[in-house]
Amino acid sequence: MSTGQAGPPAPQGLMGFVHRRRRGAELVLLILSLVVGIGAYAAVGLGVDGTLPVNLFTYGAWLAGLVIACHVVIRIFAAYADPILLPIVSALNGIGLAMIHRIDLARQASRPSSNGFADAQLVWMTLGAILFVAVLIIVRDHRRLQSFTYTFGLAAIVLLLLPLLPGIGRTINGSRIWINLGPMSFQPGEVAKVLLVIAFAGYLVLHRDALALAGRRFLFVDLPRGRDLGPILAMWLVSLGILVFQRDLGSSLLFFGLFLVMLYVATERPGWLVVGGVMFAAGAYAGFVALGHVHARVEAWLHPFSPDVNSFQLVQGLYGMGWGGLVGRGLGQGQPQVTPLAWSDFILPSLGEELGLTGVMAIILLYGILVERGLRTALICRDNFGKLMATGLATVLALQVFVVIGGVTRLIPLTGLTTPFLSQGGSSLVANWVIIALLIRISDHARRPPPELVEPDEDYDADATQVVKIR
Amino acid sequence: MSELTLVLIRFAYLAILWIFVLSCISVIRSDMFGARVARQEAGGPSRAERKARSKQQKSSKPRRGVPTQVVIVEGGNKGEAVSLEHAPLLIGRGNDAAIRLDDDYVSTRHARIASSGEQWFVEDLGSTNGTYVGTSRISQATALQLGTQIRIGKTILELRK
């Protein structure tokens, strides 16, 4: 919303225009998204076995039940929320489930003993939907979260340190980012990213004025003052710590990028981007020189076809997408299972192989719309905390998508991050559902029309309390 | 399963995927432009507007006029008046504020006064010390009447005719 004083007063004044509830549109889109998700499952069955899957009906009913339950909760608790967020999430999640199921089938065909991931993923999705509902019911006003700024910040740091503890920490695929929870394992970093967004938003809302003060001027850019470098330095060290001790390139990039974007949005100072960019470059170069796993990733990115570089996975993914071509092999017709981790980090090349460029473009467009709706929520939100939080949540999604899709398409070095809602991985799925719930909560607040005034009676006192009716 | 059926399924699925994407975009489009028009044709004037209109017809008492200016009745800038013609008005200590207050307890961009139809609102912009209407600190856009006092820091503003 513009705050400019110039120009004639808008006819609707305060809000520009009044948003409608749009719950009907959401329901229609949800049904379409279920067609996309369940259709993918059916197409996989037809492509692999030649018949519809036996459990198509129960599977479809389960999926439909979940999203319709979410829709009903939105109708009751967030009636003005953005109508596009939930359908996109439902569609992406459905596509992801179908693809994981498809790779399970292929792996079990060659080795009947191998375990499937799709069932566990459906359980995690259910858990995600339950958390989604819980967040909408518990968090009635996102501004209340501001009072937990430092609690959440501390909790995020504790969660990030948990995997390093000897008792519960676990190392899987070279990264020490897991903890044991009984029979399951969990990535606390995924939860930490949501908490960090809230903590950053709360901190920056209070300190943006000080952080926006200009220091030395250099090449047309006002650099920030030296004494304000504390927070960004701390965040830089945390990111480097994740890179060195947990060997997790993706999260390191995500956290630092997130902080930088939110700092820039809060202060409107391009100087922070310069400072952050220089720090990032320095950290990345130091990592490249000193850390073996970073060096290996960069080598695989620069020379994937060289015989003495370990880039089998990346090259398999690239060939898969190449084989898929413009329209893909068709669901169940390709061979995505030959790529290692085709069901998690490399799910996008798997989809590229079977749905082709046309399908991948649709998926990337869906992510684009998701991020756009998040940023639009930030634009129309009326309080600064909500603005920053929505920006941060949208940025988390955008950075994840960029880092992982950029990685598998060899735009940037490959780093391990999950593709939101598509990849197999419970912690990430649950955390992303919570992100969407928070975005829906903020957008409901932002789109809700201003309260109507109910005048008590004809002649009133200036001091009298006015009854304000909130729709 | 014949080759042809599989090809048909493949293209049908891509079509479904794109239909979904395009319907999302069409909902975004109608969300952007459709709101104001649809509101007018659907529900006619809203309750607030209707109420305000009926009020106007009923009572043409002298007190119930349309506010035309904001007057600073207390504080460092006491006596200053700003016309409401250029609404929305930004209140704060910053250079871009329409009502610039010389008051240490006022934030750079503190609050905003704007109108919706006939109704005037004041809205806090995330200030440090808050905006008060009457005695309560406001947390969202709050309606104003002629003579309602808005307290910002040590300054009190009032809507006048």
Image (cartoon, coloured by chain):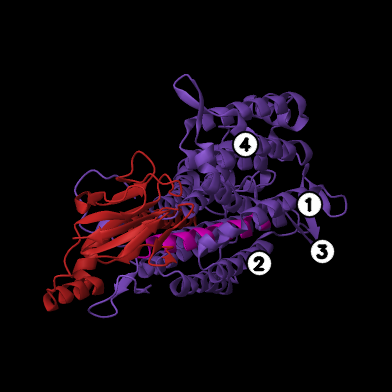
> Is label 2 on the same chain as label 4?
yes
**Labels 2, 4: front one:** 4
Give the labeled residue for mark 2: A123
**Labels 1, 3: front one:** 1
A352 lies above or below A140: above
Mark pair 3, 2: CA separation? 16 Å
Disc 1: CA contacts within 10 A as few (<14), some (14-19) or many (>=20): many
The colour of chain B is red
Q: Position of residue A103 (x, y in %)?
A: 64, 54
Give the labeled residue for mark 3: A182
The colour of chain A is purple
- Cβ–Cβ below 8 Å for labels 2 and 4? no
Q: Depth check: A130 or A319 in front?
A: A130
Is residue A22 in sight in this rendering? yes
The secondary element bearing badge 4 is classed as helix
Q: Which mark is residue A162?
A: 1
Point out the tag, 2 or 4, that comes first from the N-terminus.
2
Q: Depth check: A212 or A59 in front?
A: A212
Q: Position of residue A413 (x, y in %)?
A: 63, 32
Chain letter of mark 1 equals A
In the image, the segment drawn in magenta is: A427-449
Mark pair 4, 1: CA separation? 23 Å
- Cβ–Cβ below 8 Å for labels 4 and 3? no
- Cβ–Cβ below 8 Å for labels 3 and 2? no
Q: Position of residue A105 (x, y in %)?
A: 66, 58
Disc 3: CA contacts within 10 A as few (<14), some (14-19) or many (>=20): few
